[in-house]
Image: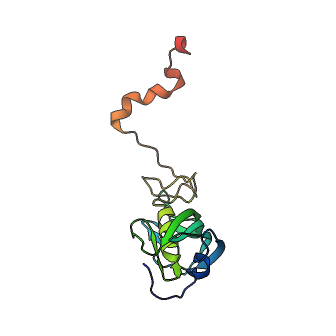
Amino acid sequence: MTRTGRDGPFVVAVAVLRKHPGTRRRLDVVGPIADLDVSNSRVEPGSAVELDVVLESVLGGVVVTGTVSAQWEGECRRCLETATGRLVARVREVYTDHADPEIEYAMTDDWLDLEPLAHDACILELPLAPLCGPDCLGLCPECGVNRNHESCTCTEKTDPRWAGLAGLGAAEAIPEWRK
């Protein structure tokens, strides 16, 4: 995903920073990133992804530390309505001249591209099975009504294999001497 051009909001010049190891520079970057989706959640195309990071010059590269955040939306796994939220991912990564693509991000000349870092952080933080809320009641398996908005008249059917245990939870099923 490394781009060859020096354009876009996530491409940062670091030539001056790299001349002085130990030097830090704070950076806030906002811009859209394409293809941010997993299973049932996504960051809408064109939506802002925000980076709040500190760049620190080290021998052989630059360490990027901070947060990546964005609004996401998806389909609730229980009721199938729209679920939304804000992802916030903490990052701490190393950019080097001769990076191993499995463990580091590459720098090109005196530039580094923060977009691959932001993309990876968002993908890892997006929920695989989003919920519209922790107390979502979901859909009735019998009639399909959304139990968050209305009640249904369906009665829960007990699996016949569990019928023998049905009375054990009732208070009257407890012998007097055990109360």
State the count of labels: 0
Q: Is residue 32 above or below residue 131?
A: below
Direction left: furthest residue: 161
Q: Nearer the viewer, residue 24 or 75?
A: 24
Residue drawn at the location 53% of the way across and 10% of the way down: 177
**Rendered-image quadrant of the N terminus:** bottom left
Q: Is residue 71 visible?
A: yes
Does residue 23 lie above or below 172 as drawn?
below
Residue 88 picture location, percent across and down: 59, 63
Residue 77 percent across, percent down from the top left: 47, 59
Picture colour scheme: rainbow
In the image, farthest residue toward the top:
177
Q: How far from the left and from the top, in percent, is residue 104?
A: 45, 68
Of 174 and 122, nearer the camera is 122
Point out residue 56 in the picture as x, y percentages from the top left corner: 60, 69
Q: Residue at x 51, y 79 (%)?
A: 113
**Front-most of residues 63 and 11:** 63
Residue at 61 percent across and 74 percent down: it is 20
Q: Considering only vertical position in the picture, is 163 above or below 120?
A: above
- Quarter of the picture holding the C terminus: top right
Residue 122 visible within the image: no
